[in-house]
Amino acid sequence: MTVPLSILDLAPIPSGGTARDAIRNTVDLARQAESFGYHRYWLAEHHFAAGVASSAPAVLIGLVAAATSRIRVGSGAVQLGHQTPLAVVEQFGLLDAAHPGRIDLGLGRSGQRRAELARSSERPPDPPPSEGRVVDGLLIPPPFDFSALIKAAPHLAFQASLLQQPGAETPDFADQLDDVQAFLAGTYASPDGQSAHAVPGEGADVEVWILGSSGGQSAQVAGERGLPFAANYHVSPASVLEAVEAYREAFKPSDVLEEPYVIVSADVVVGEDAATARELAKPYGLWVRSIRTGQGAMPYPTPEEADAHVWSEEDRKLVADRLDTQFVGDPETVVDGLRVLQRVTGADELLITTITHGHADRVRSYELLADAWR
């Protein structure tokens, strides 16, 4: 089955470039993605990353929506742990008022997860030993070992403190989602019966999505509320099947969906030929390493900068699951791999994220993929 392709953009800042370059490139890519036939264009939310300009997705969504006319534009995802439901609904209500019927509100609990990881009492347990497996042609690697990030816990705690007001405590993700939906529907009321209304926001024609990397709360809540769900093969490939299975098992029909709807993400680099694609994809491992050592994403390196890095065995293990599950090659090879991902996960849509140092190479990768997919 041929399913729609969509895009997840982090507005990457290339080595030697600036945030201004990244934003200009994002707007240009969105315009071209619309002409290539992509279904939706999502902007991520990342903080404290020297190589990522997408710290305020609502602002970028406004820029992209204004520069395009048909493609759906949204967040992948707003981190609810850093904002109140009212603030989120007001922002996206404004976006819907300016660009009616085109806005997606993707929500995630990364903000909560950052705080949990930073607190020593809630450090994730070591993953069980695993050699990984291949499921009907799809690689499911061993789970990522978070122990490398434990050393960065004090730094992560400091960053988490800067993303909230002093003394603030983030409510449960499910409760926050319920408040978002209540503000959108115009039914929000306090426990003692006082009502409040989001203006703009109430009645906004936005699609609400939940993003998740495991079979935990995000997948469960998305299913129980009958909302569409985005599973992250590109972030957490080891748990993608667990995530989509948990969502489908928890799914209950709603006013939004009668049946489950899943979008699955993938890291992709397409070149005119395999050798070109491999050269363009060289910096990816070094970039992932910067994230997984707690530094935050570095400015995206050139292939030459990637070649200059001396890799230790520890480094290689740190990024192996992400490198092994990146789809890199000529158009036909990548399409074959993505069709396996779609078949095994049962995805109703695929969400493609491509990062290269050169902007023209990134645009060309998306163009080649779109042509081959059709």
Image: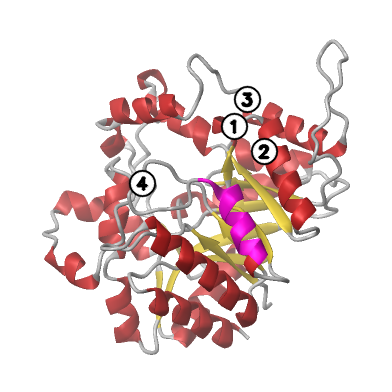
- The mark found on residue 88 in the picture is 2
Q: What residue is shown with label 1?
A: 83
- Residue 241: percent from the left, percent from the top? 56, 54
Q: Quadrant of residue 22?
A: bottom left
**Mark 1 secondary-structure assignment:** loop
**Mark 4 secondary-structure assignment:** loop
Give the dominant element type of the magenta stretch: helix, strand or loop: helix
Whether residue 353 is visible here, answered yes or no, is: no
Q: Residue at x 32, y 54 (%)?
A: 288
CA neighbours of label 2 inside 10 A, class few (<14), some (14 to 19), many (20+):
many
- The mark found on residue 172 in the picture is 3
Q: Measure the C-alpha gap from mark 2 to mark 1.
A: 7 Å
Q: Residue type at mark 4?
A: Ala
Region in magenta:
56-66
- Residue 192: percent from the left, percent from the top? 85, 10
Q: Residue type at mark 2?
A: Val
Q: Residue type at mark 1?
A: Gln
Q: Measure the C-alpha gap from mark 4 to mark 2.
A: 22 Å
Q: Earlier in the sequence, mark 4 or mark 1?
A: 4
- Residue 215: percent from the left, percent from the top? 58, 42
Q: What residue is shown with label 4?
A: 49
Q: Measure the C-alpha gap from mark 3 to mark 4.
A: 26 Å
Q: Measure the C-alpha gap from mark 3 to mark 1.
A: 13 Å
